[in-house]
Image (spheres, rainbow, N blue to C red):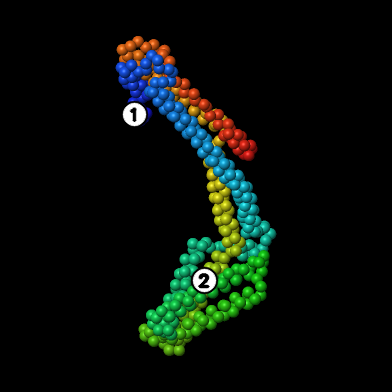
Amino acid sequence: MAKYFKRTQKRASWERIAKERGVRDGKGEKPAENWPANSVPFLKEVNKLARLEADNRAKRSREKLSDLVTQTIDRDTRVNELRSLISKSDTDLNDAKTRIDTIQKELDGYSSENPVGKFARTRAITDWFYFPALLILAVGEVLVTQPAVFYLFGDGTIEAWIVSIAIGLLTVVGAHVIGISLKLKLDRQRPQENWVIKLAAILASSMLLAVIVLGTLRAGQTLNKLQEFTIIESELGRKIFLTFFFIVIQVAFIVVASKLAFLHYSKTEHDLRLAKSDYKKLKKVHEGRLEEINNLQSLQFLTPEVIEVEKNNLIASWKIIESRYQAACAAYADANIHARRDDLNAAHPSLLAPELGLQLDEFSDLHEIALRLKQARD
């Protein structure tokens, strides 16, 4: 009968099933006059199922509150960790802001400062202009020196291309170093050592010597190709002109690259940009932690009030289960009495609904845990 009842209750209410069983049992003269209380199998089965449903509801309430215990502990642990991290990030943000202000003051200088010293810390051209211009100069230098290098190492060989590119980059990088050295020499707050200045002079002399050699070689290559060049008639004059021409072009590359580096370089502005970048990163992390802690604090966590609400919900659900149970028992008794051929009192003990005897879980252990957690948060 229990299996039949479980199958049929999925398709119909307890009360409907009780009426059907009441009619069937009544026609069979069940229960008899001599049956004691709590002896009707159907009523006992309904009692068992009502108790089972009530117990399952109580079990779900306890599981829900137990999950809240774990979530609350994890949440409180993370909140404490975030508070510590936020405190540290507050300090880091203040330090980063102080560093930005310090560098900015250094960059701005003071009203009576020598303009040359302030110019030494100022960047006159931006990155988006400087680096493309430097790249164009490097490409131009490679194209100017490429024929002379091809003449020495062979036309179109890998070695010739590598040397051509290396010379082009060497010239531009060397000019970059010279420009930075000249800019640093103006900064009285960061005076250069004498050996640094001497090293820059040696680099400039080496570059100039390389330019003269390459210019002379390039002029020799081009001399035989100027058949229609009649402005200078003598061969010696043409050779001097071509040598001077290629030397001036390459020196112009170096001078322009040095000037660009001179106008672009500013360690103070570079430091300021890095400081601002670090500040933005720290601020982003800090805001992320604030958002996370706000989200965690908005979540529901275990408190005595939450436990009381869940207990009241459990009591309400039990009352619904009990009302359904009482209605089913009453429907069974009524159908049974009307279907019988004999005369059985409706108040017969066997037709009375057995007591459910539900024991309410007060969740006292969870109350104690909630109080401890609240004290820990406070």
Residue 100: x %, y % from top left: 61, 55
Disc 1 packing (10 Å; few <14; some 14–19; many ≥20): few
Of residues 367 and 127, the one nearer the viewer is 367
Tell me which label, 2 or 1, sits earlier in the chain: 1
Q: Disc 2 marks which amino acid?
A: Ala
Disc 2 packing (10 Å; few <14; some 14–19; many ≥20): many
Q: Which residue is drawn at 49% across and 74% down?
A: 169
Give the structural element (helix, strand or loop) at label 2.
helix
Q: How far apart are marks 2 and 1 (CA)?
A: 95 Å
Q: Residue 178 carries which label?
A: none
Of residues 363 and 21, the one nearer the viewer is 21
Q: In which quarter of the image is the N terminus?
A: top left
Q: Which residue is drawn at 52% across and 61% down?
A: 126
Residue 150: x %, y % from top left: 41, 82
Q: Disc 1 marks which amino acid?
A: Tyr
Residue 181: x %, y % from top left: 60, 71
Residue that numbered label 1 is attached to:
4
Residue 204 sits in which quadrant? Answer: bottom right
Q: In which quarter of the image is the C terminus?
A: top right
Residue 228 sits in which quadrant? Answer: bottom left
Give the structural element (helix, strand or loop) at label 1.
helix
The residue positioned farthest toward the right in the image shown: 112
Residue that numbered label 2 is attached to:
257
Of residues 43 and 361, the one nearer the viewer is 43
Q: Which residue is drawn at 43% across and 85% down?
A: 152
Above or below — where is 57 with respect to 294? above
Q: Are marks 2 and 1 in contact (CB under 8 Å)?
A: no
Residue 108 sits in which quadrant? Answer: bottom right
